[in-house]
Image: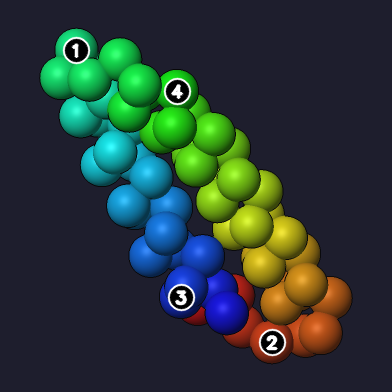
Amino acid sequence: MLSWALTFLVLAIIAGVLGFSGIAGGAAAIAKILFMVFLVLVIASVVLSAARGKPIV
């Protein structure tokens, strides 16, 4: 589950870089939303993994 969250976080960062550089104004808003959603998912995955006693990576 953590690997999926990290994968989508990387995709959101790439979308953010493309959107924030002025390529597309609409993509910037979508990238901000995706970045925040997947950042929350990464944090939740780390917390749940730590709570279960599993290694984080």
Name the residue carrying label 1: 22
Q: Residues within 10 Å of mark 4 (few under 14, many from 20)?
A: some
As drawn, 30 above or below 9: above
Please indicate whether residue 28 sits to the left or right of residue 54 in the image.
left
Dot 4: element: helix
Q: In this orientation, does residue 21 appear? A: no
Q: Nearer the viewer, mark 2 or mark 1?
A: 1
Which of the marked residues, 3 or 1, is nearer the chain's N terminus?
A: 3
Q: How many marks?
A: 4
Image quarter (top left, top right, bottom left or bottom right) of the N terminus: bottom right
Q: Nearer the viewer, mark 4 or mark 2?
A: 4
Q: Which numbered tag is attached to residue 2?
A: none
Q: CA distance from mark 3 to mark 2?
A: 14 Å
Residue depicted at 55% across the width and 51% down the height: 38
Residue depicted at 45% across the width and 23% down the height: 29
Dot 2: element: loop
Which of the marked residues, 4 or 3, is nearer the chain's N terminus?
A: 3
Quarter-of-image position of residue 23: top left
Q: CA distance from mark 3 to mark 1?
A: 30 Å
Q: In this orientation, does residue 22 appear? A: yes
Q: Specify the farthest residue to the front.
A: 26
Q: Residues within 10 Å of mark 3 (few under 14, many from 20)?
A: few
Q: Nearer the viewer, mark 3 or mark 1?
A: 1
Please indicate whether residue 17 sits to the left or right of residue 31 in the image.
left
Name the residue carrying label 3: 3
* Kind of residue at badge 1: Gly
Q: CA distance from mark 4 to mark 1?
A: 11 Å
Q: Nearer the viewer, residue 57 or 14?
A: 14
Do the numbered discs 4 and 1 sit on residues whose CB atoms are within 8 Å?
Answer: no
Name the residue carrying label 4: 29
Q: CA distance from mark 4 to mark 2?
A: 35 Å
Name the residue carrying label 2: 54
